[in-house]
Image (tube, helix red, strand yellow):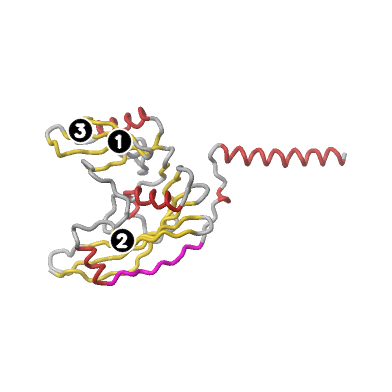
Amino acid sequence: MQFQRTNMKKHQILFLIIFLWSCKKDGENIKEIVTYDEPIKVELFASDKEILNNAYDSTYSFPKGYYRENNLEGFIYYENTISTRTNEKVTIQLHTNDKNQAKAWSELSNKLSSQYRELLQERETEKYFEFKRVELNNPRGILLSRVHKSSYFVPTIDANTINYLSDEQTKVGIGILNQRPISIETSKHFIEYYLSNWSKVLETKMLELPNWYQYNIKVTELVKADLRGCDKVKVWEYNYFVHKRTGDVYYDRTFIKELEGKCW
C-alpha cells in the first residue's frame, strides 16, 4: 500500500511537470515567469527654453541616432482589426508570417476604404510585409500598407491608440518581441521602430535592469490655444520595457510638467 501511494505521488508530480511544460510549449506562458523590476528614475535634463524650442521647431522630430526610415515615399499604415473589420471592438495591428495572408488583409482594407488605391509594389523586410498603393487620380497619394511579421513582433495593442489611454493606466502590455537574441541594442532598435511615427522626442536613455531592458523617452506635446489665449507645452515621460528572456513588452506613462507657450 505504501509503495502504491508513493508510486501514485510520483506519477502525479510527473504529470504536473509534463502539464506545465506543455502549457509553455503551446505558447500559454505561465505569467509567474514575468516579474517586474523596479524602474530606474531618469531626471529631465532639458531646460524650459529647450523644451519650448523643441515644441515649436518644425524641422525637429528625433534626437541624433534615433531610428528612422529614410527616403520613404508615402504614409506608413499598419493594417489592423478595424481596417479589415476582422474585429471592430478592439484595434490591434495584424501580424503573420504568410505573405499571401498579409496581401489579403491589405487588399481587404483597400476594398473597405473610402479611397481606392492601386497596388504598385510589394516588398518585405525582417520586420514586415509592405504593399505600396497609390490613389488613381493623385500620384502623390501614396500609402505604404504594412503587416507585422510574427517572427519579429506580435502586437496586442495598436500603437496609434497609446496616447488615448487613461493617465491612471500602468504596465500596459503592447505585445511580444520575437526577435532573438534579445539585447539592449535590439530592444532599443525595436522600440524606436515601433514608435517611429512619433515626433518631438526630447530625450532618450537606455537602461538595463535585472530582468528587463528599460528605455526612457521624454516627449513634448504642443496644445494650441483656441482663438485668443496661450499655447500649452506638456512634457510626458514614457518608459518602455522589454523582458530579456520572454520578449514581453510593456510601457508606462507619467506627466512631468506643463509650460506656457506662445500667446495669441
Q: Mark 1 points at which residue?
A: 130
Callout 2 amino acid: Val
Residue to which mark 3 is pinned: 117
Q: Does the magenta stretch include residue 205?
A: no
Q: Distance between the residues labelled 3 and 1?
A: 14 Å
Is residue 41 inside the magenta stretch?
Answer: yes
Pointer 1 or 2: first along the chain: 1
Q: How many marks?
A: 3
Residue 151: x percent and y percent? 44, 38
Q: Nearer the viewer, residue 44 or 228?
A: 44
Q: Is residue 29 left or right of residue 70?
A: right
Q: Residues within 10 Å of mark 3 (few under 14, many from 20)?
A: many
> Which residue lies at the image location 17% right of the left edge and 69% below the top edge?
262
> Residue 254, how many percent across, how many down?
38, 63
| Residue at numbered disc 2 | 219
Name the dominant secondary structure of the magenta segment. loop
- Measure how far apart labels 1 and 2 are at the Cα level: 28 Å
- Depth order, front residue of 164/250: 250
Report the side of 211 relative to 238 (left or right).
right
Q: Give the residues in magenta.
A: 38-47
Residue sitting at x 34%, y 70%: 45
Q: How far apart are marks 2 and 3 (CA)?
A: 34 Å
Which of the two discs, 2 and 3, labels the residue nearer the N terminus? 3
